[in-house]
Amino acid sequence: MNAIKKNIYYKILAVAVIFIFFALVAPLCAPNDPLHTDFEHVLEKPGENYLLGTDQVGRCVLSRILYGARVSLGMTFSLLGMVFIFGVGIGTVAGMSGKVVDSFITRLIDVILSFPEIVFAIGIVGIIGPGIKNTIFALSIIWWTKYARLTRVLVISIKNSEYLAAARMAGAGTLRCVFKYILPNIVSPLAVQFVLDIGNIMLALAGLSFLGLGVQPPIPEWGNMLNEGRAYLQTAPWLLLYPGLAIFLTVSLFNVLGDMTRDFLDIKNI
Amino acid sequence: MKKYILTRMVHLLIVMFVVSFFTFAMVYIAPGDPAELLLSAHDTIPTSEVLEKTRTEMGLDDSFIIQFGRWLKGVLHGDLGTSYVSGEAVWDRVIPRLGMSIKLAVTAFILLVGISFPLGFLSAVFKSKPVDHTIRIISFLEISVPTFWLGLILIYTFTVKFQWFKIMDQQSVKSVVLPAFTLAVPLIGRYTRIIRAAILDEYSKNYVLGERSRGAGELSILLRNVLPNSILGILTLLGLSVALLLGGTVIVENIFSWQGLGSLALQSVTYRDYPVLQSYVLLMSIIYVNVNFVVDVVTIILDPRLREEN
């Protein structure tokens, strides 16, 4: 990666950080209460009163989008954080233990991955019921396998390296090996996968909310705003345009960040 | 090779068995009493005696293994149980719907192959030229766009603004185009990238340098070596795309009011109609693992290198 690209990478990273910051302080920037209904301004076009218009019960679309960013990012990062820790943990155990434990974990992962992911998620949400927590749970059950699989392969590749054999001979125990010699060396590819997944998870969560399985009204979330707004496709297209654009731009931002992080850390094949 | 295919077949059977087991177990541990759900769906509040009787009739008193065995036997005979809501056989409701979903997925797959191959190919051949940059930007946008939003935008543009397509009429060829395209878009982006990378990777190999030094023409290298060598890897990855296509149908069917299995599954979530939901998960997964089995076998048959290895 040359200097110009590095410079661009830092700028995009800064934009992403600023974006996350704005999502956190949404209550301070939003012009209106996202749940406040104003029946004198129902389905109002974007204009002076409401910058991005109002919805079918007169709620401010802009404020809802700003609050929605918080819900969306909060869900994405808590899900991603969970599957990351769990997946890396299980993957390390599988990679280090070998034989029985390893083959059991590998088989389990194979089984979970033989279900198409959204189909599996809908199956689980259908049984435990719609809602934020349940959707996150359903997607977690599938998503940890990706990290477990990647970590397992990486751990095994380092387990067979000469420097680890040297560390072992010098008397390092398994735990010391894992935390001091293995994990620090595999953190880059895992980090790249993490950043690349932000966009994917955001889309999956918004999609499930769009289907009415994730975030429930009246909580503002981009996916369910689209779901509520679609009935007004002909009369109030702004109800669809802006929340969708918010998802599109945010996912694009994190996807650029992911691609560039991969180039930056010089990781191939993820 | 025969031995390998046979081993893969046994493996496939095991995977299908385990998938069925998980699908059954998922509904088995679901909250709610199936007998009560079935009875209360018909607007009656069942007495405890009726409940007890239905429970025995449905075999809910038997152990888990026996229930699973009975269910699996039924599935193999084309009996997916009875819908809690309509009381009809699930099979009769699900199969026509599955046909509609497959029609959608197959059309999307054709679009996927038909669009991403030429784009990826052009992008690789004209690497770092304006054509490549344009294609890369387009594929990046395709990956980032939410399908549900794209679908709504397409409906708005083509049916509300210009009235070119009728989305409600599902008999005509035209009506499948928009939903299938919507379904295919994120995958087109992804595969354009993959195909580009695969071709470029093949170009970087030493034999290409060797051929060039011996004076072979670029076109001949491309058509005789690079393409055939890279296409098999792409084929395997296309098999995996089927998961995304099958999973994506639920969103697209929902937007375009397409009467497929996905939209039925979504209804069954609302009504807690577990047998229908179960059939959805089961059928989609069975199709997915079978497609990947076929892809594996085809790859082995086509690739002489793998044939010898196995």
Image (cartoon, rainbow, N blue to C red):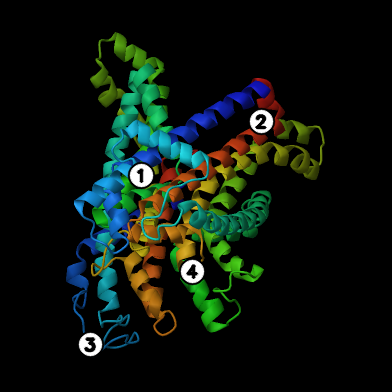
User: Can you say whether B245 is above or below A29 in the image?
Assistant: above
- Going by the numbered disc 3, the residue's amino acid type is Phe
Residue position for label 1: A194
Calculate the distance from the C-alpha at mark 1 to the C-alpha at mark 4: 35 Å
To the question of a shared chain for discs 1 and 4, the answer is no
> Between A200 and B179, which is closer to the camera in this rendering?
B179
Q: Secondary structure at mark 2?
A: helix
Residue toward you, B212 or B76: B76
Q: Earlier in the sequence, mark 3 or mark 1?
A: 3
Q: Secondary structure at mark 4?
A: loop
Residue at numbered disc 2: B300
Q: How far apart in space, not on screen, are marks 3 and 4 (Cα)?
A: 31 Å
Which three-letter amino acid code belongs to the residue tagged 2?
Ile
As shown in the figure, which amino acid type bears the numbered disc 1?
Phe
Residue ID for mark 3? A39
Please state the horizontal and vertical placement of residue B79, each as a whole percent of the image: 48, 46
Q: At 61% across and 34% down in the image, what residue appears?
A: B296
Task: Give how far apart the Cα atoms at labels 2 and 4 are.
Answer: 40 Å
Q: Where in the figure is residue A121, as x and y percent of width and height?
A: 37, 49
Q: Label 4 belongs to which residue?
A: B257
The answer for how far apart the CA atoms under marks 3 and 1 are is 43 Å
| Same chain letter for marks 3 and 1 | yes
How busy is the neighbourhood of tag 4: few (under 14 within 10 Å), some, or many (20 plus)? some
Q: Are marks 1 and 4 in contact (CB under 8 Å)?
A: no
Q: In front: mark 3 or mark 1?
A: 3
Q: Which mark is residue B37?
A: none
**Residues at discs 2 and 1 both on one chain:** no
Q: Which class describes the residues within 10 Å of circle 3: few (<14), some (14-19), or many (20+)? A: few
**Which percent across, then down, holds residue A46?**
34, 84
